[in-house]
Amino acid sequence: MNQFTFKGQIIGIETKTTQAGKTFATFTVAAPDSYNPQKVLNVKMTAFGKASEEVLALGEFATCTVTGKLDSREWQGKHYIDLKAMSVTAAV
Protein backbone atom coordinates (compact mmCIF):
# COMPACT_ATOMS: atom_id res chain seq x y z
CA MET A 1 0.00 0.00 0.00
CA ASN A 2 1.35 3.39 -1.02
CA GLN A 3 0.42 5.49 2.03
CA PHE A 4 2.11 7.44 4.80
CA THR A 5 0.83 9.00 8.03
CA PHE A 6 2.71 11.22 10.44
CA LYS A 7 2.22 14.00 12.96
CA GLY A 8 4.04 17.34 13.01
CA GLN A 9 3.76 21.11 12.93
CA ILE A 10 3.03 23.12 9.80
CA ILE A 11 5.91 25.58 9.41
CA GLY A 12 5.19 27.05 6.02
CA ILE A 13 2.30 27.28 3.54
CA GLU A 14 2.32 28.63 0.02
CA THR A 15 -0.67 28.69 -2.33
CA LYS A 16 -0.22 28.27 -6.05
CA THR A 17 -2.46 27.99 -9.10
CA THR A 18 -2.33 25.33 -11.81
CA GLN A 19 -2.46 26.20 -15.50
CA ALA A 20 -6.11 25.11 -15.37
CA GLY A 21 -6.79 27.75 -12.70
CA LYS A 22 -7.16 25.44 -9.68
CA THR A 23 -5.56 26.46 -6.39
CA PHE A 24 -3.32 24.09 -4.44
CA ALA A 25 -1.01 24.35 -1.44
CA THR A 26 2.60 23.44 -0.91
CA PHE A 27 3.57 23.22 2.73
CA THR A 28 6.27 21.99 5.06
CA VAL A 29 5.68 19.94 8.19
CA ALA A 30 8.30 19.69 10.94
CA ALA A 31 8.10 16.15 12.30
CA PRO A 32 10.27 14.38 14.89
CA ASP A 33 12.59 11.70 13.51
CA SER A 34 11.43 8.35 14.91
CA TYR A 35 15.01 7.02 14.86
CA ASN A 36 16.65 10.07 16.45
CA PRO A 37 14.33 12.03 18.81
CA GLN A 38 16.76 14.98 18.87
CA LYS A 39 16.38 15.47 15.12
CA VAL A 40 13.48 17.19 13.32
CA LEU A 41 12.61 16.36 9.73
CA ASN A 42 11.26 19.16 7.53
CA VAL A 43 8.98 17.41 5.05
CA LYS A 44 7.72 19.35 2.03
CA MET A 45 4.53 18.19 0.34
CA THR A 46 1.66 19.25 -1.87
CA ALA A 47 -2.10 19.23 -1.23
CA PHE A 48 -4.89 19.55 -3.79
CA GLY A 49 -8.65 19.98 -3.41
CA LYS A 50 -10.08 19.24 0.03
CA ALA A 51 -6.63 18.55 1.54
CA SER A 52 -5.48 22.00 0.38
CA GLU A 53 -8.50 23.58 2.07
CA GLU A 54 -7.70 21.64 5.27
CA VAL A 55 -4.11 22.93 5.31
CA LEU A 56 -5.22 26.53 4.78
CA ALA A 57 -7.92 26.24 7.47
CA LEU A 58 -5.43 24.92 10.04
CA GLY A 59 -2.83 27.56 9.20
CA GLU A 60 0.85 27.92 9.93
CA PHE A 61 2.19 26.54 13.24
CA ALA A 62 -0.78 24.18 13.70
CA THR A 63 -0.02 20.66 14.89
CA CYS A 64 -1.51 18.22 12.42
CA THR A 65 -1.72 14.63 11.28
CA VAL A 66 -1.02 14.15 7.59
CA THR A 67 -2.07 11.11 5.57
CA GLY A 68 -0.92 10.94 2.00
CA LYS A 69 0.65 8.97 -0.81
CA LEU A 70 3.97 8.86 -2.62
CA ASP A 71 4.03 9.87 -6.25
CA SER A 72 6.89 9.74 -8.75
CA ARG A 73 7.62 11.75 -11.85
CA GLU A 74 10.34 12.19 -14.44
CA TRP A 75 11.62 15.55 -15.59
CA GLN A 76 14.54 16.05 -17.99
CA GLY A 77 15.70 12.47 -17.54
CA LYS A 78 15.71 12.61 -13.73
CA HIS A 79 13.24 10.86 -11.43
CA TYR A 80 11.66 12.59 -8.43
CA ILE A 81 9.47 11.46 -5.53
CA ASP A 82 6.62 13.76 -4.46
CA LEU A 83 4.59 13.55 -1.25
CA LYS A 84 0.90 14.28 -1.85
CA ALA A 85 -1.25 14.99 1.19
CA MET A 86 -4.67 13.35 0.96
CA SER A 87 -5.91 14.41 4.42
CA VAL A 88 -4.65 16.99 6.92
CA THR A 89 -6.38 17.10 10.31
CA ALA A 90 -5.73 18.90 13.59
CA ALA A 91 -3.76 16.75 16.05
CA VAL A 92 -4.07 16.80 19.80
Image (cartoon, rainbow, N blue to C red):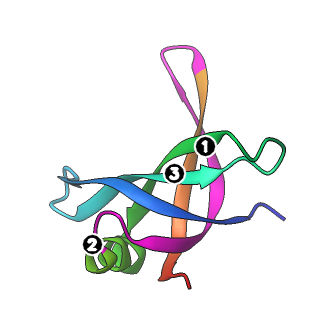
In this rendering, the label closer to the viewer, 1 or 2: 1
Q: What secondary structure is found at the residue carrying circle 2?
A: helix
Q: Name the residue under label 2.
A: 56
The disc label shown at residue 32, or none = none
Q: Residue at point 62% right, 48% down?
A: 71
The residue sitting at 84% across, 44% down in the picture is: 35
Q: Tell me the kind of residue under disc 1.
A: Val
Q: Do the residues labelled 2 and 3 touch (CB within 8 Å)?
A: no
- Which segment is the magenta one? 59-78
What residue does disc 3 label?
30
Given the current orientation, which residue lies at the most extreme front position?
38
Q: Which residue is drawn at 27% across and 72% down?
A: 56
Percent x, y of residue 42: 52, 42
Q: Is residue 75 magenta?
A: yes
**Is residue 21 positioned above or below 82 on the image?**
below
Dominant SS of magenta comes to strand
